[in-house]
Image (cartoon, rainbow, N blue to C red):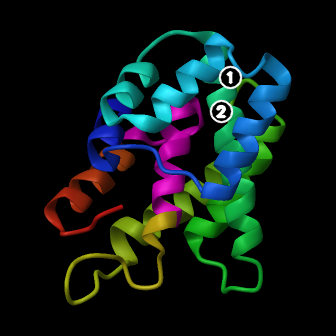
Amino acid sequence: MKKRILETLGTFKYNADVQKKFESILDVRFGHKSDIKAKFEAFFSSDEEMKKLLNESDELFMAELKRLDLMNLKQRLIDLKGQKETVVIAYMKALVQEIEQQALFCPSSELERTEDTMFQHLLDGAVYNDELTGLEGISNENLRLVLQSWALYPEFVKHPEKCIEMLDCFAISCMKL
């Protein structure tokens, strides 16, 4: 599933302000010339480096990347305040809550319910726009953030087969996440 997500997304993208704040936090926590800082600079600068580092087993790097992902999700939810809640936004909220309470060893029933609702809508009820570049009422950026999170937290996906089905639908369409 992770490989298919990376193929669909191409690269990870982050809010520029969140990325700058994260880089400043890395400087404070690890030092300006630290190995982890160098890895993140490579991660942000090259698609190939990004893919290589995502497949590495460096626990510290992955822990910090997950921290960045959470910061990015939270910022997106702040940016979306006041907008009509979609199934993807509801899932993003449940995902943030799940990540913050990650002491649990299996996804909560709330996360599973919102995932089921989201997949049901995306696979059975959503309609592509006329150009086939997006789903009506669903932000491609929000879908991208969910997929990025799933690449980092595959254990949170209750139905990986539905994720693959959704990615197949995106591949057939002209959607660019």
Outermost residue to the front:
33
Res. 95 visible in picture: no
Residue at 19% x, 69% y: name it.
174
Q: Residues within 10 Å of mark 2 (few under 14, many from 20)?
A: some
Whether pointer 1 and pointer 2 mark residues with C-beta atoms closer than 8 Å, the reply is yes
Instruction: Where is residue 127? Give x, y as percent.
Output: 32, 82
Q: Residue 28 appears at what percent x and percent y?
A: 85, 27
**On the image, which quarter does residue 124 sit in?**
bottom left
* 55 in the magenta segment: no
**Spot occupied by residue 153 in the image (x, y as percentages of width and height):** 57, 33
Mark 1, Cα crowd under 10 Å, few <14 / some 14-19 / many 20+, is few
Residue tagged by mark 1? Answer: 63
In front: 20, or 115? 20
Q: Is residue 35 above or below residue 26?
A: above
Q: Main secondary structure of the magenta part?
A: helix
Does residue 143 belong to the magenta stretch? yes
User: Which quarter of the figure is the N terminus placed in?
Assistant: top left
Q: Which residues are magenta?
A: 142-160
Under mark 1, the amino acid is Ala
> Which quadrant would residue 15 be assigned to in this image?
bottom right
Q: Position of residue 98 (x, y in %)?
A: 75, 42
- Residue at image point 71% right, 44% down: 70
The residue that appears at 78% across and 17% down in the rendered structure is 30
**Of the numbered discs in the image, which one, if any, rests on residue 66?**
2
**Residue 15 seen in the current view:** yes
Instruction: Identify which amino acid the numbered label 2 is placed on.
Output: Lys
Q: CA distance from mark 1 to mark 2?
A: 5 Å
Seen from the viewer's position, the closer of residues 111 and 68 is 68
